[in-house]
Image (cartoon, helix red, strand yellow):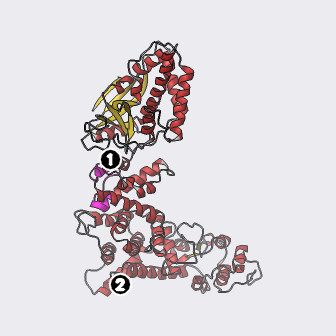
Amino acid sequence: MRASVCQLRDLYTTFNKAYVIPSYQRPFAWSRDKAAELLETILSDSNDDEVSITSLGTLLFHPLELQRNNPYGNNLPTSNAVNTIWEVIDGQQRLTTLALIGKCLNDRLRTLQDNGLVYQPNTDLQQLYCTYRRVNGRPMPLIIRDGDNFDTGFNSEISRFLDHFNNLNQPEPTIGNNLRLVYEGISHWVWENLDASNFQRFCDHFLDRCSFIQVEASEENQAFTLFETLNSTSEPLTAFEVYKSRVVRDFPGNLANFEYTNQYLNYSDSKRDEITKKSNDLVFFHGQVWCGIRTKIHFVYLKKYLDRQLLEDRIIGLEKISLFLKDVWDNQSESFSWLSREAINHIRFLKASKHFAPIPLLARYFADSPEDLPRVLEIVCGFFVLWRSGLANNRLPEAYRALFDQNSPNNMAIVGGRLKRPHELASYFREILISRIGVPQRGDTAERMETLKQNWLHNFQRNLNYDELPTICRLVVLLDVESRLRSNLLPDDPWTKLDDIEHIFSQANVTTDSIGQVINSIGNLTFLPPTINRSIQNIEWSEKKQIYDLLTRPTRTNINFYEDGSPLPEAVVDFLRDQNTPCLAYLCDICSHATWGESEIRQRNNEMLNRIWEIMFTNYLRVN
């Protein structure tokens, strides 16, 4: 690495050099006011004899090693390409602005010379925006972006704009409004503020006393490590953005478009920190799915991993994972024929539970066997619910990590592993649960499974309460309504609702410690339409029982009063009158009780736990 303090003219003295802006760099973003502020500073400093230099900050470059078949021209004698390319790691905004200033100063100088000014700058101002390389007498642009090529043409707005400066007979290219406004603002400032009396003084100060720290990194990793340090308070690059730039150079065409990845990252609408998190997660998941590597979520480690992934199949694999994250995990797109309503609810449940550990597992099946995903989602949900209902959460991710461990017999990574069939995956998770819950080593299978179930019921039911595990409790209550996740009695996404869980025994009516201990258990929970739930929260069981009974009737009716003649809550009356409201038949078992208290809650709690075990272990984790 080399660092030096240089005058501005030193940027342009190397013969036949050009600067390339990597594709991960954002578009030109300087404003007209910011460019004018720079010019005003230079003008003020040039008029102040006490000011020796004007600092332009730090510019960070990485010289690219050009070979005969490089992406910017083939370097043969007939090539249009320059001999030296410097990749701009940090400084593209300033370099672009300096190029525009150079063009405007050069135009102004010619006019002043035509009117008698005798002055020639020590650096040709044209070199601020074009190279020494000439093609049929026409110079090449000094700044290009990934995807541009000196032999085959220019696609980026900055290269086309600078190229137009060198051939004004051609129509002006279409460029972004921001670049045009800044150029027009610089041109206006130069013509308004510089004339024969001050042009030479301004220009000499601009070229000889505007200085910067030029850092030339010999290794790319070294350059990006330094870039992170220099920009610790700015928006950091992501490893994927650097990787994308390299793919653009090595795989021009469809592979370099990253269609699904760009859609997933959503650069146009997402905040920068969201893009950074998504990018880092994407590379992290790719490492696990592809070869079982769990790289650290840090730029340097993620970049080192991606440096080894410049292969066509790896690029396609990254796109597949992006498609999974965007259309399956994030949006549950119903464009996939295999993504059933039940599978969608399983995904939404896992997301609502903030259970992200199985994402690589699900992405692995999406990559090679998407038709198995609904069954895999069922297996994952069964395993997660049975574990999380009582076991510590910190050990849970280990079960998923082992599936992408290069040294594990269960390794399912694409490279070096084998994808389990769904019944094998179910068996894998069953064995983990058996080991964690505890079961005798001896005895017939039926006896051991019954012991396993009883151990789970005994040890786990005290932990399953709405305060600590609300999403799992919602699932248990929903499965008590229907044995599958297809309910038409609840919202499309039952996991995002906050006010439809009904505490049958009202929290406001708690009078003893024992009833308080079970008030939030699943045995005391059910679903009610939110408006009704809010209106009957604190009423006594005798009144609530009457309302439950009315809600279970299959035909709508106009009933306005309790049996004692007092008025029903307005929300209940409106619900009963509406011919489109459903019959809440699942309340029948509850309202069949003459009283509702601790014993009823404990009895129902036990019944629901038995039911959830049969659904999750016997059905979801079945091995046939």
Q: Foreground residue, 240 or 27? A: 27
- Residue 289 is inside the magenta segment: yes
Query: Dot 1 lies on which element?
Result: helix
Over which residues does the magenta segment extend?
A: 285-310
Q: Quadrant of the N terminus?
A: top left
Q: Label 2 belongs to which residue?
A: 450
* Chief secondary structure of the magenta portion: helix
Residue tagged 1: 249
Foreground mark, 2 or 1, reads 1
Query: Which residue occupies 51% across, 82% down?
Result: 603
**What type is the residue that disc 1 sits on?**
Arg
Secondary structure at numbered mark 2? helix
Rendering coords of residue 47 (x, y %): 50, 14
Expressed as whole percent of the image width and height from the top left, the position of residue 244 reads 36, 49
Residue 473: % across, % down: 50, 72
Residue 464 seen in render: no
Circle 2: residue type = Glu
- Residue 271 among magenta residues: no
574 up-or-down from 98: above or below: below
Q: Quadrant of residue 577?
A: bottom right
Q: Position of residue 585 (x, y in %)?
A: 59, 84
Residue with the most extreme right position: 565
In the displayed structure, would residue 448 be above or below residue 168? below
Question: Is the residue marked by circle 1 packed among few (<14), some (14-19), or many (20+) residues within 10 Å?
Answer: some
